[in-house]
Amino acid sequence: MKIHFSICFSVFLLFTLKQLYAQPSQILRGTVTDYDSKFPLTGVNVILYKDTVITKVVATDENGNYRMEGVPVGRNQIKFSYVGYAEQTLSSVMITSGKEAVLNILLNESVHEINEVVVSAFKSGETRNEMAVVSARPFTIEETDRYAGSRGDPARMASNFAGVGGADDSRNDIVIRGNSPGGVLWKMEGIAILNPNHFNI
């Protein structure tokens, strides 16, 4: 009997101490609406801060209502954040243990200007060199493997086009419409190179 009484007394004492040392809390609720149209906003983040650390986050429902439980009694910092609207932070919201705190918020729209997006397109076979106004023909790395006798060499591949000739199989310099092979400018990723091959022949 004494053992049973001591167990009950210990449980009662622990429960009482927990209630004494537990931090009192309250419920914070309210509605978030648009400042101009007074239309309720859905999905607004209601954030509770403890110093600079986020402790609780809730979101408004389809009617713009929110309900946050377990808000500690005292002064609290609460931020309302929503895409397309200016954030609103209240740093001294007083929460008391006597009744639920009701906080209705109006948010203003915020316009953010971003840089323009430029989309450019090229036709198939169109050159991207602005200096070449006529007789320009681009080709890709994949095309160099499809042309007969090119062996992955862009100079040998270019010799298949009209008006372009090469010396022989032992050389890879090309002659375009009778001009000197020294007048050909090779570029790789916009940088001028002497020859498109590893070894200059």
Image (spheres, grey):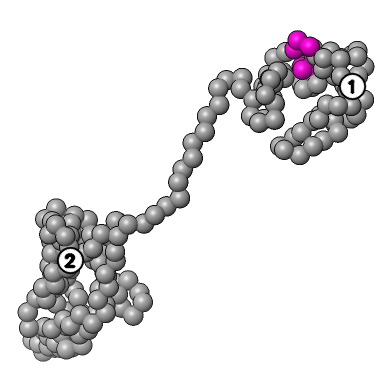
Q: Which mark is residue 58?
A: none
Q: Is residue 161 magenta?
A: yes
Look at the image and give the residue range highlighted in magenta. 156-163
Q: Nearer the viewer, residue 120 or 31?
A: 120
Q: Is residue 189 magenta?
A: no
Q: Residues within 10 Å of mark 2 (few under 14, many from 20)?
A: some
Q: Which mark is residue 106?
A: 2
Vertical placement of 111 versus 123: above or below? below
Q: Is residue 39 left or right of residue 58?
A: left
For mark 1, give the secondary structure.
Answer: loop
Q: Which residue is mark 1?
A: 180
Q: Which quadrant is home to the N terminus? A: bottom left
Residue 176 appears in the picture as rendered = yes
Q: Is residue 120 left or right of residue 132?
A: left
| Residue at 42% from the left image edge and 52% from the top image edge | 114
Q: Which quadrant is home to the C terminus? A: top right
Measure the alpha-carbon separation of dots 1 and 2: 75 Å
Residue 58 appears in the picture as rendered = no
- Quarter of the image for residue 185 reads top right
Compare marks 1 and 2 and give the one earlier in the sequence. Answer: 2
Vertical placement of 18 versus 125: above or below? below
Q: Is residue 192 left or right of residue 68?
A: right
Q: How many marks?
A: 2
